[in-house]
Image (cartoon, rainbow, N blue to C red):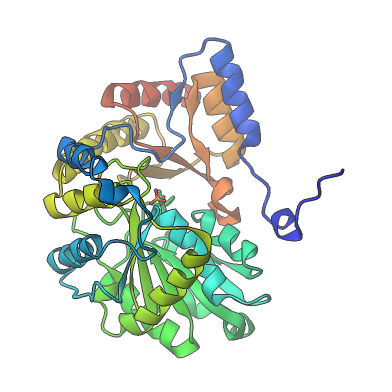
Amino acid sequence: MAVELADRLKKLPPYLFAQLDEAKARQLAKGVDVIDLGVGDPDLPTPNPIIERMKRAVENPEHHRYPSYEGMLSFREAVARWYQNRFGVELDPASEVITLIGSKEGIGHIPLAFVNPGDVVLVSDPGYPVYGGATILAGGEPYNVPLLADRGFLPDLSAIPGDVLARARLMFLNYPNNPTAAVASLDFFREAVDFAREHDIILCHDAAYSEMYYGEPPHSLLEVEGARDVAIEFHSLSKTFNMTGWRIGMAVGNAAIVQGLKKVKTNIDSGAFQAVQEAGIEALDGQHGVEEMRRVYRERRDVLVGGLKKAGFQVEAPQATFYVWFPVPQGFNSMAFATRALEEAGVVITPGVGFGGYGEGYVRAALTVSKERLEEAAQRLAGLMA
Ligand SMILES: *Cc1c(COP(=O)(O)O)cnc(C)c1O
């Protein structure tokens, strides 16, 4: 039998990193000491108190059964406590909070709840590829909203054509932003909420990096008055507590939007392992290791940005996230420069074009290796400028 993929899979954009993955495998096979700044996955371990809580929870037979779809009330209460302390936002844990199996799970599923075939979803370009992919899987059409340097990588909402707005059901925003590391002001969030109300668009804000900051703490979209009428905000414990492998996150906001997401999940998954939710309560209440996490990435950021600047790269220190997003040198496109960095310097960086057409001309380096390795990476990249 010829196995034929469904049309929705054929519509997904091509995977642009295949060629780079192969080039990396070739370098490794040759014995090159590759420094990988490609993936946004923390290299540090999960803080100990979270692991200890997990060990105890895993022995409790109550947690061996199916969890509830929306998550344990105790986890959702911990989320509400954290929102109150961190953002001054009050949430009803019963109706305005849902546990996710990592935030990607919720982001990937939400278009299924609100997008009909032919509806438009506004996605940022460059952006996290899941927004567009999930839109296509739901039968919707992604519309790419450019994020440009001269606007601080915030979208120009007034530039989106009226006929697109008439068909738009959802808009994804993500601040602090992957890949550009941009942070949004409360003023921008106010503008976004007004825009969503005016055009009847559900705002989906991905706040996975809200705790990874080096200046003023970033805002929650829900701090804006009226946001609760139109918005849902996604959070993750992955980056904040070095828990990418644990698969735990949450979405909060408008109760009807949360209910829509829950209805999808009820038909697809059976909730997050309760022992992991217990560990999540420990993480949120204790904020274990968060200050240390910020200190480590700030030091690493200064090492890499300092080294790249000295070498003549045009690069600024990010105020949030663990990404450094910078323009490639003259005469290169992003794929050509990333390929050269790998083949001639043994450094993996991600070409901006992999995050969308407007990412062309940039590369992203993740601060997920030690200071010493970042210093070495900067020196090797400096060699390409000589
Ligand atoms: C890492 C990341 C996530 C999600 O992570 P989960 O591990 O699924 O919680 C979500 N959004 C962005 C932009 C990310 O970079």
**368, 237: nearer the viewer:** 237
Q: Residue at x 58, y 10 (%)?
A: 30
Picture quarter containing residue 12?
A: bottom right
Quarter occupied by residue 192: bottom left
Of 212 and 79, the residue lying toward us: 79
Q: Please, which residue is most extreme toward the right here? A: 1
The residue lying at 54 percent from left, 50 percent from top is: 355
Does 96 sit left or right of 56 as displayed? right
Query: Would residue 259 be found to the left or right of residue 199 on screen?
Result: left
Q: How many marks?
A: 0
Could you tell me residue 168's position as x and y percent? 57, 79
Q: Is residue 144 visible?
A: yes
Residue found at x 63% / y 77% = 116
Q: Extreme bottom residue here?
A: 198
Residue 212 x %, y %: 26, 49
**The N terminus lies in which quarter of the figure?**
top right
Residue at left offset 70%, top offset 55%: 9
**Location of residue 378 with respect to 284 vertically, above or below:** above
176 sits left or right of 107 in the view: left
Q: Position of residue 305 (x, y in %)?
A: 32, 36
* Residue 212 shows up from this direction: no
Residue 16 vertical placement versus 141 (above, below): above
Residue closer to the observer: 330 or 61: 61
Q: Quadrant of residue 314?
A: top left
Position of residue 240 measured from the top left corner of the image (x, y, whole percent): 26, 47
